[in-house]
Amino acid sequence: MKFLLPPFALLVATATAAPTSRNGKQGQEGQQGQQGQQILATFDDLPSLPGVSELNPVGNYRGLKWQGFDVLQAGVAGINAVLPQSGINVAANSIVSDTLQGGISLTPLTAKSFDFQSLYFGCVVNTVETAASAPEQCTVAFTAYKDGKSIAHTTINEPFTPTNPLISKMAKATFPSSFSGLDRLDIAVVQSITPGTLTALEIDNVSYQLNSK
Ligand SMILES: *[C@@H]1O[C@H](CO)[C@@H](O)[C@H](O)[C@H]1NC(C)=O
């Protein structure tokens, strides 16, 4: 008898086990916790065509507006220079995306704010019309905006160095608590081997939490 827990204790145990904290293990997608909704964006459930990204804006996806990103089918052999972290799709930005959509900016659709936790990223030399090319070293700036202010709260620069000159793995960037409670995140390639116009940024497995309050 002494191992039987009262219903109240079970309820507490269940609530505690829910993956709500930004430090917790990756939660089930779409799980609603006390603090917010944990998301892993992989772009794999978005339509894509091999090697063609510019006409497929990510748009509104998983609670965020992904300005400046297009869906790129990168996981097809021979198509790309940076391996997706999951599935065949990544989100890609290039000068063409910028021209059509403006610079890269993530904003919540209906959530009050979001906690930006981590992502995988890589840079490739951007050839005309496709992203089939070679990986290249780059530095990417992530700039956090909070509390409705137009002045940046924090900027972090993250380096990408190809693990292989032909087909590279992505690099992982993990963000500190200063990237919590954001109302906007701007992303920019601030340094690369080729001129900025010839560099495309690719991202995958983006983890964040949507906060309703
Ligand atoms: C990326 O996301 C996929 C799909 O959820 C998952 O299977 C994979 O383990 C993730 N990879 C990393 C390194 O997080």
Image (cartoon, rainbow, N blue to C red):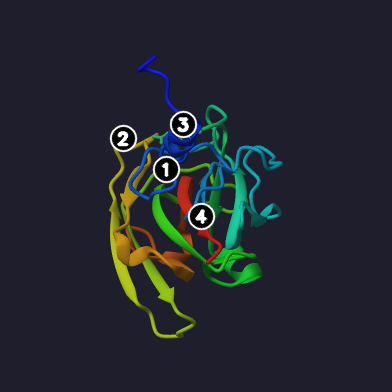
Q: Nearer the viewer, mark 3 or mark 2?
A: 3
Left or right, 45 with reference to 205? right
Sequence-wise first label, 4 or 3 = 3
Identify the residue under disc 3: 10
Separation of marks 2 and 4 at Cα, in angstroms: 38 Å
Residue 68, picture quadrant: bottom right
Identify the residue under disc 4: 36
The mark found on residue 134 in the picture is 1
The mark found on residue 164 in the picture is 2
Q: Nearer the viewer, mark 1 or mark 4?
A: 4
Residue 190 can be seen, yes or no: no
Residue 147 can be seen, yes or no: yes
Other-residue count near label 2 (Cα within 10 Å), few / some / many at <14 / 14–19 / ≥20:
few
Going by the numbered disc 2, the residue's amino acid type is: Asn
Q: Secondary structure beneath disc 4?
A: loop
Separation of marks 1 and 4 at Cα, in angstroms: 39 Å
- Given residues 54 and 129, the one toward you in this image is 54
